[in-house]
Amino acid sequence: MDNKIRLDIVTPYGLILSEDVDELTATGSEGEFGVLPGHVPFITTLKIGMLIIKKGGKVEYVFVSSGYAEVTFEKVVVLADSAEKAEDIDVSRAEAARKRAEERLAQAEKYDFGRATAAVERATIRIQIAVKKTAR
Ligand code: ATP
């Protein structure tokens, strides 16, 4: 389709999103990158972060846990460990997850520091995205 790019977000839990968008921004391991239709093909790993999707004058936010993005001329496929659209984020669950992970960080000798840090990051970004949705 002219001036649109297809975005598919796939996780082990299912297809989270499949739509034609105008533009998207994601957090790659080398930093943020933007994709417009006709972008040069590439593959990158993704960090825990948010996808910012522009579509018909609207902006949507999607949480993406770590994974990969494959960009071709007409399509972006995101393969992530988990992903949720802003409206599907359960804020209480994210707050509970953050509290649990922070308690683990405080007992570093008992828990895996890297896992707890990643859990804090996931929960914090989920909360940020959910707040953006309600602030619109
Ligand atoms: P938790 O400790 O609450 O499970 P987590 O970061 O360990 O959080 P993930 O492993 O990233 O969770 O995701 C497991 C599944 O639960 C995925 O389907 C993900 O989309 C969903 N999920 C996790 N947290 C939330 C949330 N706050 N709101 C909605 N869905 C969530």
Image (tube, grey):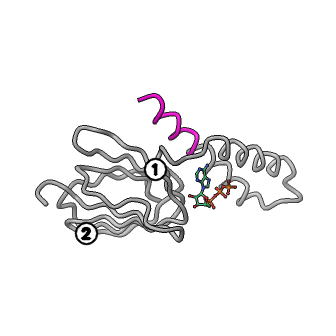
- The residue pinned by badge 1 equals 85
Which of the 4 image quadrants contains residue 17?
bottom left
* For residue 96, side relative to residue 5 (left or right): right
Quadrant of the image occupied by residue 112:
bottom right
Q: Nearer the viewer, residue 135 or 121?
A: 135
Magenta range: 126-136
Q: Which mark is residue 72?
A: 2
- Where residue 28 appears, as percent x and y from the top left, is 43, 58
Instruction: Determine the secondary structure under disc 2.
Output: loop
Quadrant location of the C terminus in the rendered image: top left
Earlier along the polypeptide chain: callout 1 or callout 2?
2
The residue sitting at the left extreme is: 2
Tell me the kind of residue under disc 1: Lys
Asked which quadrant contains residue 60, the reply is top left
Q: Is residue 70 above or below residue 109?
A: below
Q: Amino acid at mark 2?
A: Thr
